[in-house]
Image (cartoon, coloured by chain):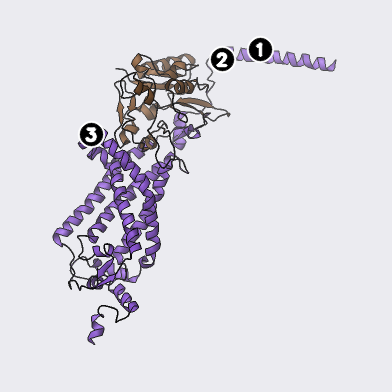
Chain colours: A brown, B purple
Amino acid sequence: MARMKFLCDADRCIECNACVTACKNEHEVPWGINRRRVVTINDGKPGERSISMACMHCTDAPCAAVCPVNCFYTTADAVVLHSKDLCIGCGYCFYACPFGAPQYPKVGNFGSRGKMDKCTYCAGGPETDGSKEEYEKYGANRLAEGKLPLCAEMCSTKSLLAGDGEIIAQIYKERVMKRGYGSGAWGWKTAYRETIES
Amino acid sequence: MASFGRFIRLALGAWALLLLVSMASASAQQVNPTASSVKEQQLLQELNRIQGRVSIPDQRSGVLEQPQGREWRDFRNVTLRWIGGIAILGMIAAIVIFYLKVGMVRLEAGRSGRTIVRFNAFERFVHWLTATCFIVLAISGLNITFGRPLLLPLIGFEAFSEWSQWAKYAHNYLSFPFTLGVVLIFLMWIGGNIPNKVDIEWARRGGGLIGHDHPPAYRFNGGQKMIYWIVVIGGGLVAASGYALMFPFYGTGIEGMQMAQIVHSIVGVLFVAAMIGHIYIGTIGMEGAFAAMGSGEVDVNWAREHHSLWLDEQMARTGPNDGPRQPAPAAAE
């Protein structure tokens, strides 16, 4: 089985937000929630850099560790998913997440945040693969159809890579070798406790 | 004519510049165009978080990375469980040992049959309002920390989730009457709870818990003053930190909420431990004590043994004829 990861080649990201739009459209993500977003550091200044970020599907995921009702589970592809039926909307995963992935449909309504929503790596949820219930709660299950996450598929500069960690790391390494520079795999140290030597 | 000459010069200059740029890029294939850009490790070392601008409406998502959630995770899953476990089980163990060795603190003179008002109806209402809210808040709060390892394996995912959902709603909504109760307790009993010299004597004699000692006390003795300040300060802290968590991003970011959760949970478990002690003394720990908050009237002998100075005050106020019995020495002489 593969160990699925995301890798954003920050030297190629042009902040076009195609990944954000693709994700919102594919999963019909509720208004106000963005499972993926592009952050631009030093915007408009020399040294500007944009990175596309979503749930990184961490190794030994902090969200799963702190969840009071243990609603998270890791798939055979190492994708971190959760059950909205079990989630009580307490907010603990969002205190623990290093990437700001967990979000709630209702913020600040006497703590009635609603069920947590986050990137599913286009892998749906605990319901039957491709079922209507799964789509309504978690969005499309592309992984079950043998497809990779749409954000990476739609990336206009092929900056965002999704797939087995070793394969996308190899692609990234080859790119760095060929062009002679690279800023590393953003978030990998925090998420997977490893970096790509380049 | 002068303007045409200027145009020619400009056009030539532009062409020359274009040529120069294309030559430069051709000669330098391996130039890193983002060499001066920020690096992840450098940003994390500087601030332990990476933040930027986003073009979506949710500006809070501009925080790209904040690895300190890892330390908070250790606190929540390891440190807090130790603190809470030791505080609560330690308190229960201490009470059980004390009860088995010393037993209930009896009224030495027995019941006189005459009573004196200790807490009026409003005071009792506020006490029980706060107390019932506290018990629900304590159980639902402990469920968040200890439910997953202790209760979930017993009742299963669905049932535990259902229960936790209701517990969370109870925890959120009962926080409002609880906070009201703490504020009212603060206001209505502040007068009798300012520490004074009598408390030093009371503390020096161990509060009279060991043996048959009865150090003098006004309306509230040293121990009760401690409970009062635990409720006021602890209640204030859990309320403030709790509301920070209940209204995310109103004045706090994620780090602020992690800090709030740390304060809320530590104060919470210590509060529970202290209240277990309070409940013990108010019920099976001391004969005649429960009446103070039950009917509101305590036996005069109970008042004499535990709050002698307060009883004297009350007697002086109501007058000798009205009082049940005058203090013994005055009558004998």
Q: Earlier in the sequence, mark 3 or mark 1?
A: 1
Residue at the disc numbered 1 = B19
Tell me if residue B19 comes above or below residue B165 in the rendering: above
Residue found at x 37% / y 22%: A135
Q: Which mark is residue B28?
A: 2
Residue A9 showing in the rendered view: no
Q: Amino acid at mark 3?
A: Gly
Quarter of image, res B72: top left
* Element type where label 3 sits in the image: loop
Residue under the image location 34 percent in, 18 percent down: A130
Percent across and percent down for residue A68 are 30, 37
Give the quarter of the figure containing the C terminus of chain B. bottom left
Give the camera-side residue of A60 and B125.
B125
Q: Amino acid at mark 1?
A: Leu
Point out the frontmost of discs 3 and 1. 3
Assess disc 2: are there few (<14), some (14-19) or many (≥20) residues with their C-alpha within 10 Å of its C-alpha. Answer: few
Q: Quadrant of residue A176?
A: top left
Q: CA distance from mark 2 to mark 1?
A: 14 Å
Determine whether, in the image, residue B315 is placed left or right of residue B176.
left
Please identify the residue farthest to the right as the structure is shown.
B1
Q: Element under label 2?
A: loop
Q: Earlier in the sequence, mark 2 or mark 3?
A: 2
Does residue A189 appear in this view?
A: yes
Q: Chain of mark 2?
A: B
Q: Chain of mark 1?
A: B
Q: Which residue is mark 3?
A: B156
Tell which circle, 2 or 1, labels the residue nearer the N-terminal end: 1
